[in-house]
Amino acid sequence: MLPEIVGRNEFAALIIRTDYDDEAAWRAMVAEASRPWGSGGEYEADVHLVDDPAWAAATPEAVLTALRPDEELSVVFVADSTTMQSAHHALLALNLRHEDEDLDPMYYQELIDSPPAREFRTAPAAVHDVHANLSIGNMDFEEFAEEALADPEGILRPAR
């Protein structure tokens, strides 16, 4: 069982480390995610980093299961082996919104046949934009996932 996350400010983007093979890659990702963000760098980065070996090798499904009870959290970012091996340190963004899983096929067949995206890769510098917009309901997870899929490398990048 994965440990409970304590002391997280609800306004902070949550980044969980699940790969411990490359300390330098982790530090580089943390540095990127900790930079001010926004079009002119006008917003201070607010991240809650979980750097606890108890999360080592946790699968996306295990992370989702551990965090689903937190109804205030809409997205979590995972620093997995792909993150650590990527030159971009692209984090895995996981959708935590509590979707109705018992959809009535009579009304929701399209959603049942083509469920919305549950994950995408994002550059550390784009984490805050995703977290902020999802937290206030300004954008949907699917909008960010579509933007990531449109990138040649499948990575959501910060707006320039």
Image (tube, rainbow, N blue to C red):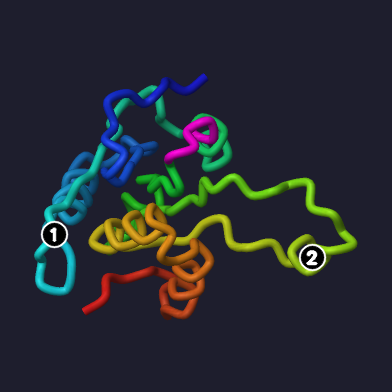
At 39% from the left edge and 22% from the top edge, which residue is drawn?
54
Is 141 or 91 nearer to us in this picture?
A: 141
Which residue lies under the disc numbered 1? Answer: 43
Q: Magenta part mainly helix, strand or loop?
A: loop
State the CA–CA distance, disc 2 to disc 1.
Answer: 40 Å
Q: Residues within 10 Å of mark 2 (few under 14, many from 20)?
A: few
For badge 1, the amino acid type reads Tyr
115 relative to 22, above or below: below
In screen coordinates, is 133 left or right of 94? Answer: left
For badge 2, the amino acid type reads Asp
Does the magenta-highlighted stretch encompass residue 40?
no
Is 96 or 93 nearer to us in this picture?
A: 96
Q: Which residues are magenta?
A: 67-72
Contact check, label 2 and label 1, Cβ < 8 Å: no
At 48% from the left edge and 61% from the top edge, which residue is drawn?
120
Mark 2 and mark 1 lie on one chain; the one further toward the N terminus is 1
Q: Secondary structure at mark 1?
A: loop
- Camera-side mark, 2 or 1: 1
97 relative to 107, above or below: above
